[in-house]
Image: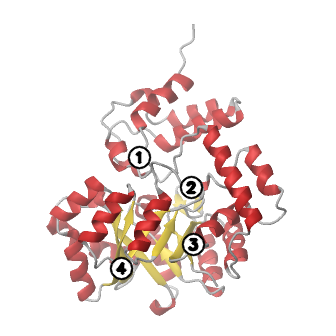
């Protein structure tokens, strides 16, 4: 059995609320099939991910039957004395006395400076000594040399969570391969996030679908997740699952895991080349950018409209742009404060892209 984790950033929803009934059924199936790792953060679903785990997992199962990871996120503290109260509120929200893993969230060069000045790494070790955290790690979104610096300065870090998928493997911005190699150099187990790149490796261009369909095998997600899971040193591969069908599909190939064959790897490499040729915006819809936007622009939704327009060239993208901006900011409302760019895990030039989106969808009628 391969180590496969339930990423709780994308859950089954009923309107704006988590569908507890379906999520409970998914939790039951996940545990019954022998998997036990759950990953959350306070910012996921505006705090609803943590409370959903309390209602659907931690209230219903013995504490020793699962592993639960949570994170210290930069948006929720500004000084050292705010870290412990925030941490305690996370324990309460999740309904547990300790976290198995506690990660310094979304570390990059700038965020790391804040964590250093607030003694976040030291406080995490104190929490571990007190038994409130079993293992301390980081999740990371930056270049490999920054990761190397952090792991050199903090050899006590036990695990590293990185974005790792076949499209980003050689990407100059994400540097999946190089970050993975830094983890191996420092002998740190790797947790994989975004193995299907926010659904992009499921919602494939038609040309890419043909390459994988020719294999006459698994789902599009299966090739992405098996690619990530096939590397040495991978402790866990996370998948954000929003319905039972996705869960059962993932279990079908992760319970009796086998790495990609040479033929499958060849097809995956062809899909990577197709994605590069598409020139799409590589947004994973993590929504970190939306919290701090002063104009309340639904940035990931507008990027999705732009990508759909490039892919399918039909009126639906224009319609959905109107839907997304009806009660929120439009792309042209961007004031270029760059708060979104500072927190974007994909290092996207959001302000520049907003201008392109506005030019495409807000054309003035003659």
Label 4 sits on residue: 158
13 vs 73, left or right, is right
Label 3 sits on residue: 231
Gap between marks 2 and 3, in whole Å?
20 Å
71 vs 86, left or right, is right
Q: Residue at x 70, y 77 (%)?
A: 258
Instruction: Relative to 61, say whether 332 is above or below.
Output: above
User: Disc 1 or 4, which lies upstream in sequence?
Assistant: 4
230 vs 331, left or right, is right
Residue 292 makes an appearance in the image: yes
User: Disc 3 or 1, which lies upstream in sequence?
Assistant: 3
User: Disc 2 or 1, which lies upstream in sequence?
Assistant: 2
Q: Position of residue 316 (x, y in %)?
A: 68, 33
* Foreground tag (2 vs 3): 3
Q: Residues within 10 Å of mark 1 (few under 14, many from 20)?
A: some
Label 2 sits on residue: 198
Label 1 sits on residue: 347
Instruction: Relative to 34, say whether 53 is above or below.
Output: above
Q: Residue at x 41, y 58 (%)?
A: 46
The N terminus appears in which quarter of the rendering? Answer: bottom right
Gap between marks 4 and 3, in whole Å?
18 Å
């Amino acid at each position: 059995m391969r180590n496969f984790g339930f990423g709780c950033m994308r859950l089954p929803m009923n309107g704006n609320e988590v569908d507890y009934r379906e999520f409970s059924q998914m939790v039951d199936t996940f545990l019954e099939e022998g998997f036990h790792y759950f990953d959350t953060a306070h910012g996921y679903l505006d705090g609803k991910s943590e409370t959903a785990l309390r209602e659907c997992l931690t209230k219903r199962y013995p504490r020793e039957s699962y592993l639960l990871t949570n994170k210290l996120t930069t948006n929720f503290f500004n000084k050292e004395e705010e870290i412990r109260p925030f941490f305690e509120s996370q324990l309460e929200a999740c309904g547990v006395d300790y976290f198995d893993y506690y990660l310094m969230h979304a570390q990059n060069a700038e965020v790391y400076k804040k964590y250093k000045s607030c003694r976040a790494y030291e406080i995490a070790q104190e929490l571990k000594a007190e038994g409130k955290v079993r293992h301390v790690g980081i999740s990371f979104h930056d270049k490999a040399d920054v990761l190397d610096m952090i792991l050199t300065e903090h050899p006590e870090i036990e695990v590293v969570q990185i974005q790792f998928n076949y499209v980003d493997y050689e990407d100059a911005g994400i540097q999946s391969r190089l970050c993975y190699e830094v983890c191996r150099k420092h002998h740190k187990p790797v947790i994989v996030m975004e193995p299907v790149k926010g659904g992009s490796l499921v919602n494939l261009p038609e040309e890419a679908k043909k390459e994988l369909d020719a294999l006459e095998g698994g789902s599009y997600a299966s090739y992405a997740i098996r690619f990530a899971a096939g590397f040495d040193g991978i402790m866990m591969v996370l998948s954000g699952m929003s319905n039972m069908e996705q869960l059962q599909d993932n279990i079908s190939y992760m319970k009796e895991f086998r790495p990609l064959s040479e033929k499958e790897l060849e097809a995956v490499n062809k899909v990577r080349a197709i994605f590069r040729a598409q020139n799409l915006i590589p947004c994973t819809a993590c929504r970190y950018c939306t919290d701090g936007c002063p104009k309340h622009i639904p940035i990931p939704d507008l990027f999705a409209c732009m990508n759909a327009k490039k892919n399918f060239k039909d009126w639906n993208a224009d319609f959905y742009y109107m839907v997304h901006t009806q009660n929120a900011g439009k792309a042209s409302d961007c004031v270029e404060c760059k708060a979104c760019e500072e927190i974007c895990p994909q290092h996207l030039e959001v302000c520049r892209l907003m201008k392109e989106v506005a030019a495409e969808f807000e054309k003035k009628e003659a």
